[in-house]
Image: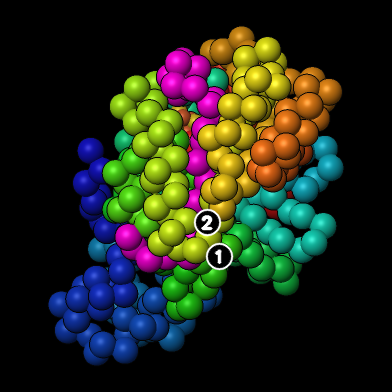
Amino acid sequence: MDQPQSPVNLYDLSLEGLSALIKSWGQPSYRAKQVWEWLYQHKVERFEQMTSLPKALRERLETETRLGTLEPVAEQFSIDGQTVKRLFRLTDGQLIESVLMEYDDGRRTACISTQAGCAMGCVFCATGQMGFVRHLTEGEIVQQALYFARHLEKENERLSNIVLMGMGEPLHNYDHTLAAIHKLNDPTGLNIGQRHITLSTVGLVPEMRRFADEGLQVGLAISLHAATDGERSALLPVNKRYPIESVIDAARYYVDKSGRRVTFEWALIRGENDTVEQARKLGLLLRGLLCHVNMIPLNPTGGYDGQPSDPERVSAFQAELAVWGVTSTVRVRRGIDIQAGCGQLKTQVLKSPRVPRKGR
Ligand code: SAH
Ligand code: SF4
C-alpha cells in the first residue's frame, strides 16, 4: 500500500539513496551533497532554485523525481494566532493534518502525522473514528516539519520542537517513523535535537521495547487514559492486546535504557476517568517510576459523546496524584477554537469543503 510511487519523492531518500541515484546518472558524488543541501538547508520549493546544479541535472531531476508531495488545502488559525493547523493533500488524494504551536518562550513546535487514519480505534479520537488508510512514507512525515521550518525561517524564526502526535500511531509505522526521526535529527537534515522530539504511542509494547533499544534520547509519551484494564480497554481497544501492566513495564524499560523521564497522557473525560478513585489507582500504578502525567481535558468529537472534565475535578485529580509523588501538568487545550485535536480539521473539511482564510 505504501509502495514508493514513481517518480521518486526526493524526501523519501536517505543521503546514501540520493548518492546512489545521482551516481547512477554518471554525476560526480558531490552533486548528491549539493542536492541534499538544497533540500534540507535551503528548503527549496522548486528545482529551478537549485542554482548550483548544471541545467541538465536539474532537468533530469525534474523529470525523474518529485520535490515534495504535500499540497496545503486548508488552514485554520486559533483566535490568539499562536496555533495554526494545516490540512495537506498527498499525491494519492489522502488528507493529513499538521499543527504549528508557538509559545511565548520562543519554542516553535510542529505536531505531525505518521499515518493517514489510524488502525487503533480509540473511541474518543477523530482519527481513530476514520479507520486506517495507509502509512505515510518517510518523506511525507519529514515534509510536514519542513513546511513549517521553511515558513518560520522566512520570518527569521526556527522550528525548535517536533511532536509525533498528529494523525496515526507512529509505532505502527515503525520503519518510516524511525527514518523520519533520524532525518529530523540529522545536523545536515532539519537539525532538531533528539531531546526536542517526542513520540506519542498508544502503547504498542513490542515496538516500545524495540524503540528503547535504538538508544535514542527522543522523548516518549504514552497514552494511558485509564488505570484499570477494564476501563482502558473500553476507551483504547489495543489494551486487550497489550494490557496496562505490560505497557508500564515497557515504559520502565524505556526509562532504564534512555535515562529519560516518560510522559503519560490522560484525556480527562467527565465522569469517566476523572474521579479521585481513578487518580488513586493511577498514583499507585506510577509511583516510583521516572514519569510525569500530562492531562488534557477531552476535545469532544463527533463520534463520541464524552465531554471534558470540569476544572474542580481536574484539580482534585491532580492533588490525589501528588499524594503518590506523581507530578502532573494540565495542558491548555491549544487551539481548541480551531479543533486542533487530532483528526478534527479533516473531519470538518470533509463535511463542508470550504477553504479557510489564507495566511502564513
Ligand atoms: N497515536 C498516538 C499519537 C497520536 S494521538 C497516540 O495515541 O498516542 C495524540 C494524543 O492525543 C494521544 O494521547 C491521544 O490519546 C490524544 N487524543 C486523541 N483524541 C483526543 C481527544 N478527542 N481529546 C483529547 N485527546 C485526544
Ligand atoms: Fe490512533 Fe492515537 Fe487516535 Fe488512538 S489516539 S486512534 S492510537 S491516533
Find residue 257 and report its image quarter.
bottom left
Comparing 258 with 346, the one in front is 258
The numbered mark, 2 or 1, whose residue comes first in the sequence reads: 1
Q: Which residue is mark 2?
A: 219
Residue 281 coordinates in the image, percent (x, y): 58, 27
The region drawn magenta spans: 213-236
At horizontal 19% and vertical 81% (from top left) the residue drawn is 23
User: Relative to 326, is 60 on the left or the right?
Assistant: left
Q: How busy is the neighbourhood of tag 1: few (under 14 within 10 Å), some, or many (20 plus)?
A: some
Q: Amino acid at mark 2?
A: Gly
Snapshot quadrant of residue 347:
top right
Q: Tell me if 296 is positioned left or right of 185 in this view.
A: right
Element marked by disc 1: helix
Residue at label 1? Answer: 195
Mark 2, Cα crowd under 10 Å, few <14 / some 14-19 / many 20+, is many
Image spot of residue 36 (x, y percent): 39, 76
Distance, label 2 to label 1, CA atoms, is 6 Å
Please state which of residues 8 and 228 is positioned toward the viewer in this rendering.
Answer: 228
- Say whether residue 220 is magenta: yes
Asked whether the residues under the numbered discs 2 and 1 touch, taking CB atoms below 8 Å apart as contact, a structural biologist would say yes
